[in-house]
Image (spheres, helix red, strand yellow):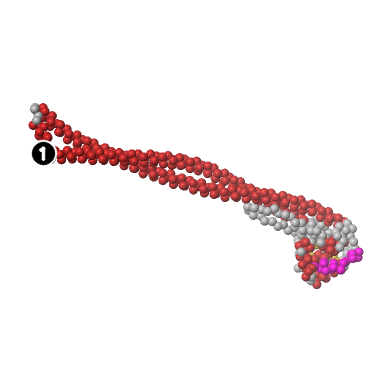
């Protein structure tokens, strides 16, 4: 290790920032909340890394927004197809209802015809029975009178012609009775056939009505089910549209983050160049406060407590380098608590360490060496975990630059 003023081969070069950004957000397939950038982090999380992370998150949001839009378009298409199907089913239902109305009207008419035919049949049966009774009465009367009227008519005839006429008269009466009885029987049989036909037609109508009602219930069920599906799609479309707005807001917020980080990177690059080429104080010109050793040792514990001793000295040297540069605050407290530089100071970890004096003896020893002007990292004012393309002095798990 060398003290301030001794020659070092390494020339410090600042290629990144000193903040580490924690992004919190919740993204789901259906809904995403806007991500808010909080510019606070550790000194070894470079601004360029934050830019890369923010760009990757923005690209992910864009991909998710596109996927959401595609899913939303599919939902809208399916929703439209279902609405069209409901319209078609409503037309079918209207036709079924019209057919059912016609069948019910035909059933009413058929019932009226059956009732009318039943009445005619009752009348025909009564007439047939009356005719039959008349014949029975005449036959019984003729039998009881012993055919006296017939014999008397023959004997009273004055000529053969009158005799034949009388015989023919009685014969025609019998023929008439037989003919009328047969007519009534035939008429009753015809009416019975008509009634049977009407009853069969009524049964067919009842079957058609039952089929129409079943079809009506089926179509009503399909319409109800389709409308339920439409309601589900409508809810999903609302969720998708809300997600689209949320994605847009999140992307806009990420773009603002990127703009902020790029401006911050430019500022840090300028600060790094200015610090390298600017005025530096000598360690002998610094007056430390009573609490500086305690504060620096606990910061070293937070940042490099698990690092080798050389790494702990290096972290302390970065703090002192900033203290000596005219581009940074001129007190230990000012350097450590400078906004967005050392994450333990912003996250509360340093406060916890200070409250419990977590610093180990090696952390105190490293703080003492740094405060005496010892540096093993030259004039480096940044450090971070190693990444590809970053050159500097590597000590333990950190690159100093």
Left or right of residue 129: residue 112: right
- 144 or 400: nearer the eye? 144
Left or right of residue 148: residue 285: right
Query: Which quarter of the image is occupied by the N terminus?
Result: bottom right
Say if residue 398 shows up in the picture: no
Residue receiving disc 1:
146
Which residue does the image show at 79% across and 58% down from the upper left? 340
- 331 or 382: nearer the eye? 331
Say if residue 351 shows up in the picture: yes
Report which quarter residue 27 is drawn in.
Answer: bottom right
Asked if the magenta segment contains residue 90, the reply would be no
Query: Which quarter of the image is occupied by the C terminus?
Result: bottom right
Considering only vertical position in the picture, is 173 above or below 348? Answer: above
x then y, percent, for residue 279: 89, 58
Question: Going by the picture, which residue comes out furthest to the right?
Answer: 285
Which residue does the image show at 90% across and 63% down from the upper left? 282
Considering only vertical position in the picture, is 376 above or below 160? Answer: below
Magenta stretch: give its range.
Answer: 283-298
x then y, percent, for residue 189: 26, 40
Question: Going by the picture, which residue comes out furthest to the bottom?
Answer: 361
Report which quarter residue 10 is drawn in.
Answer: bottom right
x then y, percent, for residue 329: 86, 60
Name the magenta segment's main secondary structure.
Answer: helix
x then y, percent, for residue 214: 44, 47
Left or right of residue 64: residue 154: left
- 2 or 52: nearer the eye? 52
Mark 1 residue element: loop
Which residue does the image show at 72% across and 57% down from the upper left? 23
Left or right of residue 279: residue 217: left
Which residue does the image show at 78% across and 69% down from the upper left? 355
Asked if the magenta segment contains residue 295, the reply would be yes
């Amino acid at each position: 290790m060398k003290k301030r003023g001794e020659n070092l081969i390494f020339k410090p070069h600042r290629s990144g920032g000193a903040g580490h950004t924690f992004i919190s957000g919740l993204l789901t397939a259906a809904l995403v909340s806007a991500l808010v950038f909080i510019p606070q982090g550790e000194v070894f999380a470079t601004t360029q890394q934050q830019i890369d992370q923010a760009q990757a998150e923005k690209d992910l949001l864009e991909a998710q927004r596109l996927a959401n839009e595609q899913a939303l378009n599919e939902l809208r298409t399916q929703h439209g197809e279902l609405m069209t199907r409901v319209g078609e089913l409503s037309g079918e239902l209207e036709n079924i209802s019209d057919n059912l109305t016609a069948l019910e009207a035909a059933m009413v008419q058929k019932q009226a015809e059956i009732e009318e035919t039943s009445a005619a049949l009752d009348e025909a049966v009564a007439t047939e029975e009356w005719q039959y009774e008349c014949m029975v009465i005449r036959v019984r009367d003729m039998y009881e009178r012993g055919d006296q009227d017939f014999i008397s008519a023959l004997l009273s005839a004055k000529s053969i012609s009158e005799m034949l006429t009388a015989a023919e008269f009685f014969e025609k009466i019998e023929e008439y009775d037989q003919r009328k009885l047969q007519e009534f029987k035939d008429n009753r049989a015809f009416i019975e056939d008509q009634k049977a036909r009407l009853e069969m037609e009524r049964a067919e109508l009842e079957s058609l009505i039952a089929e129409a009602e079943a079809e009506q219930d089926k179509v009503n069920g399909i319409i109800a089910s389709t409308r339920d599906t439409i309601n589900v799609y409508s809810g999903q479309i609302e969720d998708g549209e809300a997600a689209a707005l949320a994605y847009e807001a999140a992307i806009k917020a990420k773009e603002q983050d990127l703009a902020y980080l790029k401006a911050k990177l430019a500022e840090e690059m300028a600060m790094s160049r200015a610090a390298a080429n600017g005025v530096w104080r000598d360690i002998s010109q610094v007056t430390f406060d009573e609490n500086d050793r305690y504060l620096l040792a606990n910061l070293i514990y937070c940042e490099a407590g698990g690092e080798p001793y050389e790494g702990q000295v290096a972290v302390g040297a970065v703090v002192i380098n900033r203290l000596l540069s005219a581009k940074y605050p001129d007190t230990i407290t000012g350097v450590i608590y400078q906004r967005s530089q050392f994450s333990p100071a912003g996250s509360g970890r340093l406060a916890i360490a200070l409250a419990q004096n977590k610093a180990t003896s090696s952390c105190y020893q490293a703080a003492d060496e740094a405060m005496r002007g010892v540096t093993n990292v030259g004039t480096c004012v940044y450090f971070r975990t190693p990444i590809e393309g970053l050159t500097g002095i590597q000590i333990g798990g950190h690159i100093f630059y």
